[in-house]
Amino acid sequence: MKKSFLFISLSLIAGFALSANAQVEGVLDGMPDPSIIRDDDGRFYIFATGEGLPIYRSDDLVKWEEIDRVFDEPVPPWAREAIPGTEGIWAPEIGRINDRYYVYYSVSTFGSQRSVIGVAVSDALDPDSPDYGWEDLGLVIESIPREDPFNAIDAAPFQDEDGRAYMVWGSYNIGIMLTELDPETGKILEGAEYQHVASHPRGYWSAIEAPYMTRRGDYYYLWVSWDWCCGGAESTYKVMVGRSENPTGPFLDHRGRDMIEGGGTLVVANNDNWRGTGHNSVVQTDDGDWIAHHTYDTRRLHLHRIQQVRPIYWCDEGWPVAGEPVSETNPMALGPVEVSAEDLHGSWRISVDYEEREIIDLLPGGRIAFDRDSSWRLNDGVLTLMRPESDATAFIEHSGKSFIGRNGAGEVVRGIKINPLD
């Protein structure tokens, strides 16, 4: 269970949180397990693992400030009593249900399945609002070793357009669970069943956790993290997704595999100097969608897990891909991309499912150097690479120096420009 790697000592957690204003290329120090939401005033809020659950706010997804904590104490008294020896609160998830803000949180100990999920509620996110103030509602669900097949951590709420609300949760053990919430209380609806919705392909007690649920159009998307979270440069964490036409599943991947059977379509994985890209949340706005997750910077491992926000692009078949991280040099950009075919001329480093494959040269006239069987074209900011093995369609990002999309097999195709054509 990943959280145990973080909670070596309470002083370390507090130290990470206090460093939260240091900016390094689109990441924010000290914000593991980030849960993001946008308020009606247009500002973004992130809740993160840490002493008392720190809250951060931003206008632009780049500059963040810590504005408050949900709890005055490191752990609520009821949870400390339920989980003796706990050292902190893990993995908050913020959600809006019936115009109230609920933050679900987890309390456990190193390597234990004895865990609890609690919830606190506020009528506002802005501390200056007269409606602001967190009320702890206490226990939502617990897990007991040798009695429950799941681990009660990593809870995330979701409210559908019809008003019904759900919660997904789970880490290792059987995998990811789902149940229905009472939208009036934020607790589990009386009589609701617990449903298993996703497993790791290696089966029971394998590394799947951190579920998150969204809806787009006719589909419900279940986002999860696979593999090892917290091993620094050795981390293999990655974000996977499946979708369903029903909020309770079955959730299928691009190839039609059920997530219960280990299905999942890759969204983002280790790339460049980033390792352990996972435990995501998603914010959906009229301006676009964004994915927040934590990661390690291999050049600055002493920062431990740090937060990153990336734009989400939706491919024609309705599968998401994640762009380059937002930063001061790559700010949040909205609207159409202004790029010409000439802007794309030059050398590009290509990866497939985040594994580097080749370097290609895009030449004038839609040609690809030294490859007579391939070609490319640009149409309204969308690049199509026509290759014998599989065509790929990708979105040009606002910087003009990267693209991201999928090929016919559903694999993520990423391009980074390394040399312009003179």
Image (cartoon, rainbow, N blue to C red):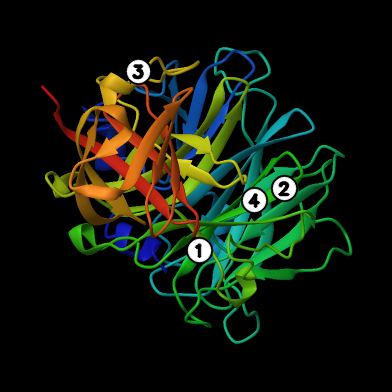
Query: Which circle, 1 or 3, is nearer the viewer?
Result: 3
Which quarter of the image is occupied by the C terminus? top left
Q: CA distance from mark 4 to mark 3?
A: 33 Å
Amino acid beneath label 2:
Tyr
State the image quarter where residue 388 is shown: bottom left
- For marks 1 and 4 on the same chain, the one whose residue lies earlier in the sequence: 1
Query: Which circle, 2 or 3, is nearer the viewer?
Result: 3
48 relative to 45, above or below? below
Amino acid beneath label 1:
Glu
- For marks 2 and 3 on the same chain, the one whose residue lies earlier in the sequence: 2
Pointer 4 with pointer 2, Cβ within 8 A: yes
State the image quarter where residue 168 is shown: bottom right
- For marks 1 and 2 on the same chain, the one whose residue lies earlier in the sequence: 1
Question: What residue is pinned by disc 1?
Answer: 209
Q: CA distance from mark 1 to mark 4?
A: 15 Å
Q: Position of residue 22 (x, y in %)?
A: 22, 28
Label annotation for residue 221? 4
**Residue at the spot 21% in from the left edge and 44% down from the top edge:** 360
**Residue at the spot 70% in from the left edge and 45% down from the top edge:** 158
- Is residue 6 at least partly visible in the picture? yes
> Which of 308/148 is in front?
308
Question: What residue is pinned by disc 2?
Answer: 219
- For marks 1 and 3 on the same chain, the one whose residue lies earlier in the sequence: 1
Query: Which circle, 1 or 4, is nearer the viewer?
Result: 4
Pointer 1 with pointer 3, Cβ within 8 A: no
**Residue at the spot 48% in from the left edge and 17% down from the top edge:** 334
Q: CA distance from mark 1 to mark 2?
A: 21 Å
- For marks 4 and 3 on the same chain, the one whose residue lies earlier in the sequence: 4
Q: Position of residue 397 (x, y in %)?
A: 37, 27
Horizontal side, residue 3 vs residue 27: left or right: right
Q: Position of residue 127 (x, y in %)?
A: 54, 18
